[in-house]
Amino acid sequence: MSTSPILDDLLRHLRPSTSQDAEPEPRRLADRLRQETGTDIALVNGEGRAEVATSGITGDVLAALGPVLTQLLRGQVAAAATQVGAMHVRCELLRREAPRSVLVVAARSPLTREAITLASHTGTVVDALRRVRHADELADRYQHAADRLRAGIFMALMSGDVTLARRMTVGDVPPLLNAERVRLHLLYCPSPERDSIAQTYQDGSGYHGRSLMVRCPVYEPHLICLVPDDDPHEGGGLGAVLRSLVQENPHYALGVSEPQPLQATAEAYEQARHALAAARHTTGRTAPYHGHAPLARLLPRGQADAWARSVLAPIDTLPRLTVDITRLALTFPRLGVARLLGISRNTVTAHLRRVEDALDLDLHDVRVRAELALALAVTGLPPVGDDAGRLPERSLDALLSTEEAATWARTFLKPVENHAHRHLLPTLRAWVDAGTDAQRAARNLDVSRTTVRSHLRTAERLLNRDLLALGPGTHDLVHALRITDRAS
């Protein structure tokens, strides 16, 4: 019997694998030993269960070895030799530290020193491979937990609750939460690559230096990156890294928000999302946000608040979860909301149906969605005083007739009113009139659906708004067209 091939095989399994598909095979190693030496082995874990065993070591054999295995696993002895029926058995404690494991070696004839040595080497390698797998599993669990914690912190910031975000870290506050203002970078890249990027720049604490990377729970190609704006080294920090990644990879794109207070992370996210929509249609594939103040902030506050509360009054008695789901569904697709909250798409639809019944409205209507989103945005602004609720209610058309709203609408639509893009505005109007159905809009315009979508992508770049996702960017377009139509 030559021991060299067996030892070579053992050493080969201990080398780091260069193939993602290659996996160590403890059972094959044990079978190889049995084939070469006629010796059976088993690796028994701390619970007394055989994780690897050749055919000669049956459950009856292990049951008979119960008292011996107990002594070994308790650390009372390091090795023991015994006999079970016609089997000559030797048991060896592989590690004294927990979790302990025991190597069982058995043969029909007395065990030779060479067989015992090879079996011990094999058992040590099998145990090492088992521990490596266990360590990899723990690392994966840690990475998963760290991902969930970072996502939780981000969602707390999205709700404007910086204190909750700090409490979630249980005292180990990441540097980002000490920043006064942040920029949100939204990177578009293939999903497997975003995971690699996030892990590459992750530090030992599970964060990313002074920044925070979060895999978007709604859109798989999106990597959310919060970067402090008060960092004097930011020019060479994570923001610069992301820009260089876009330059090096033609399938990447990057949208960057304006600096925002940490509690305004949600606004920074919307800005970056709009900027990303524009960036994907530009040659450099990187775009900062060049927008304007949200419409909700420009309306007469007291009167707008009274209007919004009147609109939302029928859903005041609905569960908070239902209202929160509705708010999210006005920003993300229903499937994305389900993924974000860990519920089914049918559950999301059921909550939205409650709102539709209470308001007697159809949330598939883009104009209804835009009006409801505006009402929710107004009520989400800081309070204006105790007398706000006693102001006379005005209609939405009256609120949108102010000079501030008219200026906002003209500024919003100006990029698509340019003579060079005169074909865009009719397409946008037809698209909204068709309920954002590109096929219906194409029929009404007597053009192809491809032409309509091409015009929409150009409009996204010029307006610096995400239109095709049917979220806030589309709502802004609906309001701008409504204001200018009434003014003409």
Image: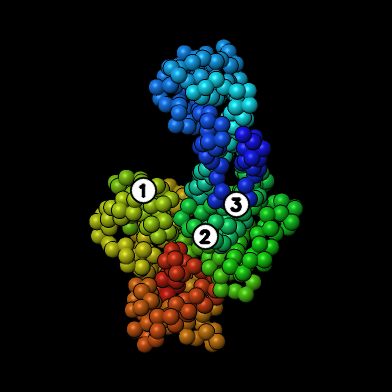
Image quarter of residue 80: top right
How much space separates mark 1 and mark 2, taking CA atoms? 21 Å
Q: Is residue 462 above or below residue 189?
A: below
Instruction: Categorize mark 3 by other alpha carbons within 10 Å: few (<14), some (14-19), many (20+).
Output: few
Q: Nearer the viewer, residue 283 or 35?
A: 35
Sequence-first disc among 3 and 1: 3
Instruction: Categorize mark 2 by other alpha carbons within 10 Å: few (<14), some (14-19), many (20+).
Output: some
Q: Secondary structure at mark 3?
A: loop
Q: Position of residue 141 (x, y in %)?
A: 52, 39
Q: Position of residue 467 (x, y in %)?
A: 46, 69
Q: Which mark is residue 221?
A: 2
- From the image, tell me which residue sits under label 1: 343
Q: Does the rendering let one see residue 165? A: no
Apparent side of residue 125 relative to residue 398 in the rendered image (left or right): right
Apparent side of residue 457 relative to residue 350 in the rendered image (left or right): right
Of the two numbered discs 3 and 1 in the rendering, the one whose residue sits closer to the viewer: 3
Q: Nearer the viewer, residue 147 or 385?
A: 147
Instruction: Categorize mark 1 by other alpha carbons within 10 Å: few (<14), some (14-19), many (20+).
Output: few
Residue at point 47% right, 80% down? 455
Q: Nearer the viewer, residue 391 or 124?
A: 124
Residue at point 66% right, 50% down? 201
Residue at point 27% right, 55% down? 353
- From the image, tell me which residue sits under label 3: 19
